[in-house]
């Protein structure tokens, strides 16, 4: 029987946006096992905040121009997508930009409540000429991974949905070196480099990713039973439960993401936890709301457990 793993995690270099972690000694092969798993989770499953929709006074769509602003609206939106936030609220946060030219508008000009903090305040958003007044309303949400603007298309005139990259981890790299324990030289040393956007420090991101990994393994070791209510829902679904996710009116992108994650039917969706669906690659909070709405039309509620 294999011994309990005993290794150290050392911070070789730690900065606000960058950390290098040395994890050793590991049994041979476990450097790649841990390195690849942690890298995937760090890049896809750590929660963060991003702007999801924008309203600009006097602008009806993103291909408009604003007289007196150096940038066109598309450039302004691209700059807004680069703004990084620290926000822990569950509801959509509201923020505004109100500026009068001549002025260099920066991310620090975004004003919201005290729970919202801009991590890169010196980011330049636009240059305004004299006399131009810029009024912008922003919606900021928490999420994981990436959420496409198609999830938020409502047809409302003046509302411009944005693609949102929620992940606060911008880059992860790992490498494996040989290390020794006594006379044995066939142990692994995992060197893990983590870069973030400044809204989370690298050590916190690493610990969070490890907790997520542990939660998945725990379900294998000590599986939690499906709630009786969920079983009952599945039993009474009848033919509806056999419908594929492509047959319940979901956007193609959302349906494809569910299929790749193994959620092929309505029955699969009922078994899944809401939080697990939010973490599916290319999904997010808004996509799950679309799924809930589609199921609601069939008289079915998504499991909140």
Image (spheres, grey):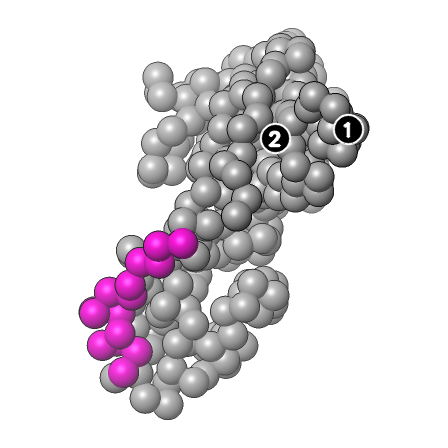
Residue labelled with disc 2: 169
Residue 216 drawn above or below residue 104: below
Q: Tell whether 18 sits left or right of 244.
A: right
- Which residue: 61% across, 30% down? 169
User: How far from the left and from the top, in percent, is residue 193?
Assistant: 69, 24
Label 2, residues with CA under 10 Å away: few <14, some 14-19, many ≥20: many
User: Secondary structure beneath disc 2?
Assistant: strand
- Which residue: 64% across, 25% down? 24
Any part of residue 235 in sight: yes
**Range shown magenta:** 221-235
User: How far from the left and from the top, in percent, is residue 57?
Assistant: 52, 33
User: Secondary structure beneath disc 1?
Assistant: strand
The foreground one among 293 and 228 is 228
On residue 162, which mark appears? none
Residue labelled with disc 1: 185
- Which residue: 69% across, 24% down? 181
Magenta-highlighted stretch: main secondary structure?
A: helix
Residue 60 drawn above or below residue 231: above
Q: CA distance from mark 2 to mark 1?
A: 33 Å
Q: Tell whether 272 sits left or right of 281.
A: left
């Amino acid at each position: 029987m294999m011994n309990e793993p005993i290794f150290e995690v050392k911070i070789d270099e730690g900065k606000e946006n960058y950390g290098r972690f040395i994890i050793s000694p590991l049994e041979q092969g476990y450097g790649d096992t841990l390195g690849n798993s942690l890298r995937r989770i760090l890049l896809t499953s750590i929660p963060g905040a991003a702007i999801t929709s924008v309203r600009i006074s006097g602008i009806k769509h993103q291909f408009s121009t604003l007289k007196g602003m150096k940038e066109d609206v598309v450039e302004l939106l691209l700059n807004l997508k680069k703004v990084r936030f620290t926000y822990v609220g569950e509801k959509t946060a509201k923020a505004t930009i109100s500026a009068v030219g001549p002025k260099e508008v920066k991310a620090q000009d975004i004003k919201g409540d005290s729970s919202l903090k801009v991590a890169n305040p010196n980011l330049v958003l636009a240059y305004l000429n004299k006399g131009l007044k810029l009024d912008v309303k922003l919606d900021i949400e928490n999420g994981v991974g990436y959420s496409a603007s198609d999830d938020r298309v409502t047809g409302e005139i003046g509302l411009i949905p944005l693609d949102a990259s929620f992940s606060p981890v911008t880059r992860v790299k790992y490498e494996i070196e040989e290390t020794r324990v006594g006379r044995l030289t066939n142990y692994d040393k995992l060197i893990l480099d983590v870069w973030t956007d400044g809204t989370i420090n690298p050590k916190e991101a690493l610990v969070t990713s490890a907790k997520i990994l542990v939660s998945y393994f725990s379900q294998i070791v000590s599986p939690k039973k499906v709630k009786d209510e969920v079983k009952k829902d599945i039993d009474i679904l009848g033919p509806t439960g056999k419908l594929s996710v492509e047959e319940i009116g979901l956007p193609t992108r959302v349906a494809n993401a569910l299929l790749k994650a193994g959620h092929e039917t309505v029955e699969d969706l009922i078994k899944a936890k809401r939080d697990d669906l939010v973490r599916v690659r290319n999904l997010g909070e808004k996509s799950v709301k679309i799924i809930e709405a589609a199921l609601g039309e069939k008289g079915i509620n998504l499991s909140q457990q």
